[in-house]
């Protein structure tokens, strides 16, 4: 239950970040302190990184629970979601 003296929080968004990015691929990794989620928009013959999230294990567990709940609600409303196939080839990076 929130404290009664709690002030509202203002969240700002950078002017160049107002829109969303489409991602059709993701790479995930972790170490003891953090999870690293890198999102890609892949359109053969190439693609680009469109987002990268680095977060603590506790926050990632909460995000996974929220996403699982959202999938459940979606499927109740629209029907079962078929899982997408894994990519057939490995994605590499050019520097």
Image (cartoon, grey):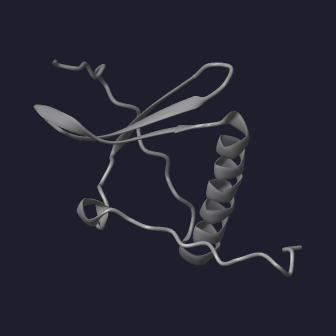
Residue at left 86%, top 74%? 3
On the image, the x and y values in percent for residue 81 come to 52, 58
Q: Quadrant of residue 84?
A: top left
Q: Nearer the viewer, residue 83 or 58?
A: 58
User: Does residue 67 appear to the left or right of 95 in the view shown?
Assistant: right
Q: Nearer the viewer, residue 27 or 7?
A: 7
On the image, the x and y values in percent for residue 72 come to 66, 63
Residue at left 29%, top 54%? 22
Q: Nearer the viewer, residue 1 or 66?
A: 1
Count the marks: how many? 0
Q: Is residue 3 above or below residue 35?
A: below
User: Does residue 82 appear to the left or right of 18 in the view shown?
Assistant: right
Q: Which part of the image, by quadrant, shows the C terminus?
A: top left
Residue at left 61%, top 72%? 9
Residue lying farthest left? Answer: 45
Q: Which part of the image, by quadrant, shows the N terminus?
A: bottom right
User: Does residue 47 appear to the left or right of 3 in the view shown?
Assistant: left
User: Does residue 6 appear to the left or right of 90 in the view shown?
Assistant: right
Q: Nearer the viewer, residue 21 or 56?
A: 56
Q: Is residue 88 above or below residue 15?
A: above
On the image, the x and y values in percent for residue 26 come to 41, 37
Q: Quadrant of residue 18?
A: bottom left
Residue at left 60%, top 61%? 71
On the image, the x and y values in percent for residue 48 come to 21, 37
């Amino acid at each position: 239950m929130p404290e009664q003296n709690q002030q509202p929080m203002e969240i700002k968004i950078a002017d160049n970040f107002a829109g969303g990015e489409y991602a059709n691929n993701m790479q995930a990794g972790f170490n003891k302190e953090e999870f690293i989620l890198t999102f890609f928009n892949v359109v053969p013959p190439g693609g680009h990184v469109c987002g990268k999230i680095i977060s603590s294990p506790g926050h990632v567990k909460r995000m996974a629970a929220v996403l699982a709940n959202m999938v459940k609600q979606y499927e109740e409303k629209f029907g079962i979601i078929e899982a997408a196939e894994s990519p057939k080839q490995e994605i590499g990076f050019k520097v």
